[in-house]
Amino acid sequence: MTDHPSSTGGGTRPGRFGSYGGRYVPEALVAALEQLDEARLKANIDPAFQGELERLHRTYTGRPSIITEVPKFAQHAGGARILLKREDLNHTGSHKLNNVLGQALLTKRMGKTRIIAETGAGQHGVASATAAALMGLECVVYMGTKDTQRQALNVARMRLLGAEVIPVSHGSATLKDAINEAMRDWVTNVETTHYVIGTVTGPHPFPEMVRDFQRIIGVEARAQVLDLVGRLPDVVCACVGGGSNAMGIFHRFIDDESVRLIGLEAGGEGVDTDKHAARFSTGLPGVLHGAFTYVLQDEDGQTLESHSVSAGLDYPSVGPEHSFLRDTGRAEYRPITDTQAMDAFALLCKTEGIIPAIESAHALAGALEIGREIGPEGVILVNLSGRGDKDVDTAARWFGVLEDGLHPDGLHPDGLEQQ
Amino acid sequence: MNGVGAVLAKTKSEGRAALVGYLPVGFPDVQGSIDAMVAMVQAGVDIVEVGVPYTDPLMDGPVIQHAADVALKGGTRLKDVFAAVRAVADAGAPALVMTYWNPVLRYGVDRFADDLAKAGGAGLITPDLIPDEGAEWIAAAERNDLDRVFLVAPSSTPERLRSTTLACRGFVYAASTMGVTGARTTVGDAAEVLVTRTRLMTDTPICVGLGVSTGAQAGQVAAFADGVIVGSALVRCLTDAASREDGLAAIRKLSAELAAGVRAGR
Ligand SMILES: Cc1ncc(COP(=O)(O)O)c(C=O)c1O
């Protein structure tokens, strides 16, 4: 296995991962997708592009990100060794910037001047606004109103960075509806505009391209774990919203057959309720947002609303490569409930002094569960995809740590549904 | 032969463009939508696009999004689409079902094609299925003698105009502007340019949609297209109506105005 990304998804047709993926879009977008595919394939083998991206990662993102061993946290996981890949330490606070910087450079290469983005937790929107400011691009971010409320801090960050944030109130008013609205903008303005999709879903080439921009996580982490432990980890854990941080850390390990790859989905209030985002528990293959993949849907193929305490995992579909990895058995996927995630969140705060994003807390909860299964000899690598600053208000309400009236209100009085 | 071919041959022989009207099933409710489709046919619409309401209509503007929302909240199901198709066929117009792809996938592509043919339907218009991904549907359509209408857009390259029109049967749907559905005050030059470019590739009739809302606009488009497609403006008749009767009256009035428009165009 080389360190180069593969240009096909392992499927039989371009843009397919087994039977998943494809390009289910209006014809009006096809020319732009072909332009993008050409640009990114050229960039993949262009030393000037790779050099510029590498320089930005070194001098702006803060790469390589470190790994941190968390022994006190691991005591609660049956004693297995747990190592965190610290994507939370990247500039803007999550893995999202890895992808956005790559796509922003491509935008300039394609001669476009405007980027649009969808965002759930706001991390991808913040990363997009940041890259736009850095590179002199106009930036518009679509965000569901449910998410503008629970992630108000990130709305403010995007606006400070000079982006326009457009709240989307129809449908479920979350990530799915923000993507619909961004697609509508894109169809209308495609000549000047690049749509920076924030995860490994959407029409080809997005799933492959975003994975290739994120796989630096696994490339670095694999070498770092070998260096620290002297062997490969037994398990790699990551939370799965659309699936970009998970594909990013999984991809370099796919050929390492001894390494289990485990994705943690939002189990919400439980997969036996209708309030969750566990696509691999109750979803079925179908089409959403341009890709054939697992989708939460009813008998008529209508998309069902998802639910999660974490805005970034609150999405009824999942990147098509994950569907392929799951059907072939190369990766496993498990649901983590809101409560399990929040317990893991609190535990990492108190035992290690690290406040994780609630999304990433799902991966931590997975590590606790898996650690107890594999025992004290095991080594688990966890992708800590983001930091929890954006989630402080949600967590403060969840745990009731502030006296009434002390919440940073005016931001979002109804920020948390649970209460 | 099923399909819209015979109607488009007839309108051509009359020296005019066809009028194609879109309404979604279930808005304001199932029976109300069926009544409106029949009224539209009686008032001069030649071909009906029977819309399937869908949770994530990313090619649609606010008017049709709202209608789909109301339809789904009111409990509209896929089986209601077949009832609407039957009613339109009985009223004497071909019914093309306009649907996003996932409802058809979930129902089963072959089963959907069989049931559509059984209901007397003419075929499908698929806004988010390009022929490149449509092999299964094209085969099912062929078995059932159904039309498949794919879209071309101002951004389509010559190669794509060729391959897409080759896959079409019935007509080619030319999306007049880059954008989503919704009435516009002007129908720009892009539509005529696109029709000219598309004609270089195919003898299949070309109908133009996106943005037409008045008889005058229909006349303008009829001057260069084989059919004029009207959606949001018709839906709006129902959105804005104070009562069911008012809605049907508005549909009849607009349909008649548009029907006069497509006859005045040449
Ligand atoms: C910190 C963090 N982790 C994970 C996710 C989920 O996205 P993905 O599954 O694409 O990594 C998000 C999305 O907003 C996020 O902000």
Image: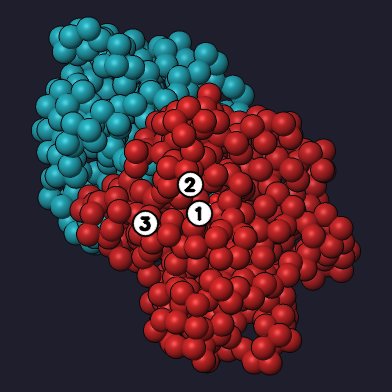
Chain colours: A red, B cyan
Q: Is mark 1 on a helix, strand or loop?
A: helix
Q: In this view, does B132 lie above or below B92?
A: below
Q: Position of residue B28 (x, y in %)?
A: 21, 23
Write down the residue under mark 2.
Answer: A395
Secondary structure type for disc 3: helix
> Circle 2 marks a residue in which chain?
A
- In this view, the mark in front (3 or 1): 3
Label 3 – label 2 distance at C-alpha: 11 Å
Q: Residue at x 29, y 50 (%)?
A: A275
- On-image quarter of the N terminus of chain A: bottom right
* Residue at image mark 1: A358
| Left or right of A39, for residue B265 | left
Q: Dot 3 corresponds to which residue?
A: A339
Front position in the image: A383 or A284: A383
**Cβ atoms at labels 3 and 1 below 8 Å apart:** no
Which numbered disc, 3 or 1, marks the residue that appears first in the sequence? 3
Q: Are marks 3 and 2 in contact (CB under 8 Å)?
A: no
Amino acid carrying mark 2 in the image = Ala
Q: In which quarter of the image is ligand 1?
A: bottom right
- Classify residue A305 as left or right of residue A197: left
**Dividing the picture into quarters, in which one does residue B120 lie?**
top left
Kindly tell me whether residue B224 is visible in this rendering. no
Tell me the kind of residue under disc 3. Thr
Front in this rendered view, residue A351 or A223: A351
Foreground residue among A175 and B187: A175
Q: In this view, does B113 lie above or below A72?
A: above
